[in-house]
Image: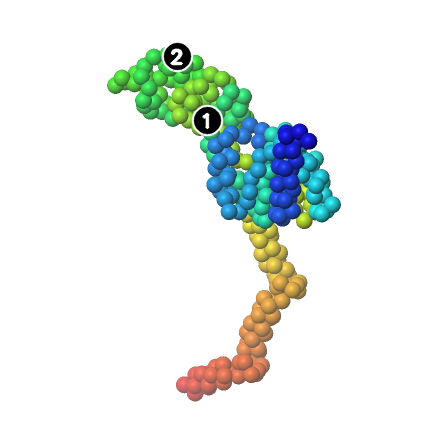
């Protein structure tokens, strides 16, 4: 057996162990991902997961080794292509993606990047000495002046709109001004857990916002059902309390004695008797 194949098989065995050890297996898309993002993700997920960068052929070989012991795991092979990073964890995929999203990194723009938002260059001192930089700034529409031996930007200037493609010249200018306009986080291409595949589009759901929306809808439905006196398991205590309160108020107005209102009725009767006597 050739040494290269042996090394590949040994690595596949190691990955196969991880496929069985952890509840969640996630494939992270590394297209246009920079080393800084991976390092930050490792820090964020330390103690909660393991990240392995292996070739897709090796990962597929590992999946083959365990598919008879972990039903459904073979589905993850459909997402093993291009540059990928494997993440192993016992957290659910939504929690993992949320943590990765929170670990957003600000990056310098490169030629071809798409502006995620409007990119604005603020007015002020650039700290750069006069020279070719003046024409470079003016070329992308940034007005300048020279003062106290350095180049100043005279007003806030939007150099790119959301969705615009960053040109090589603009990328170079932003880098010189130390402006990092690209917000990026690691995106899970697909994750496997409990025999199911969760694709990227599903995992990008903001679970916190969704939970708040569901809670708001639940409270609104309880309020509506209570207002129309439609009994449900959730509003029965509210309806009973409201009915008891209204019954108590009605019995007092009708001078109908009950165990709950007798003291109040006697007190009101006594006060009326004294008033009549007066």
Q: Quadrant of the C terminus?
A: bottom left
Q: Residue at x 62, y 67 (%)?
A: 236
Residue 267 horizontal side relative to residue 50, left or right: left
* Quarter assignment of residue 244: bottom right
Of the two numbered discs 1 and 2 on the same chain, state the one appearing first in sequence.
1
Q: Residue at x 53, y 40 (%)?
A: 100
Percent x, y for residue 72? 72, 44
Q: Which residue is mark 2?
A: 135
| Residue 191 seen | no
Near-viewer residue (87 or 131): 87
Percent x, y for residue 80? 66, 34
* Label 2 CA crowd tier, 10 Å (few <14, some 14–19, many 20+): some
Q: Residue at x 58, y 53 (%)?
A: 215
Q: Which residue is mark 1?
A: 108
Percent x, y for residue 118? 48, 27
Near-viewer residue (162 or 226): 162
Percent x, y for residue 6? 65, 33
| Residue 150 seen | yes
Q: Residue at x 55, y 74 (%)?
A: 249
Measured along the vertical axis of the image, is residue 13 above or below residue 115?
A: below
């Amino acid at each position: 057996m050739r040494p290269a194949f042996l090394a590949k098989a040994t690595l596949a065995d190691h990955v196969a162990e991880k496929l069985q050890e952890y509840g969640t297996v996630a494939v992270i898309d590394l297209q246009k991902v920079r080393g800084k993002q991976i390092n930050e993700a490792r820090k964020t997920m330390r103690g909660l997961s393991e990240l392995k960068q292996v070739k897709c052929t090796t990962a597929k070989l590992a999946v083959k080794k365990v598919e008879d012991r972990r039903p459904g795991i073979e589905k993850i092979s459909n997402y093993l292509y291009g540059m990928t990073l494997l993440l192993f964890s016992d957290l659910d995929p939504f929690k993992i993606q949320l943590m990765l999203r929170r670990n957003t990194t600000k990056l310098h723009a490169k030629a071809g990047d798409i502006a995620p938002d409007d990119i604005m260059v603020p007015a002020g001192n650039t700290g750069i000495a006069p020279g070719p930089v003046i024409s470079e700034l003016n070329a992308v529409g940034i007005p300048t002046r020279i003062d106290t031996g350095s180049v100043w930007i005279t007003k806030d200037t939007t150099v790119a709109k959301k969705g615009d493609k960053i040109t090589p010249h603009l990328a170079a200018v932003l880098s010189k001004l130390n402006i990092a306009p690209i917000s990026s986080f690691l995106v899970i291409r697909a994750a496997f857990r409990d025999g199911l595949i969760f694709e990227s589009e599903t995992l990008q759901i903001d679970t916190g916002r969704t939970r708040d929306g569901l809670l708001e809808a639940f409270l609104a439905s309880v309020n509506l059902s209570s207002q129309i006196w439609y009994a449900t398991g959730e509003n029965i205590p509210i309806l009973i309390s409201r009915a008891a309160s209204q019954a108590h108020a009605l019995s007092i107005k009708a001078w109908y004695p009950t165990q709950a209102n007798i003291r109040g009725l006697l007190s009101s009767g006594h006060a009326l008797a004294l008033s009549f006597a007066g």
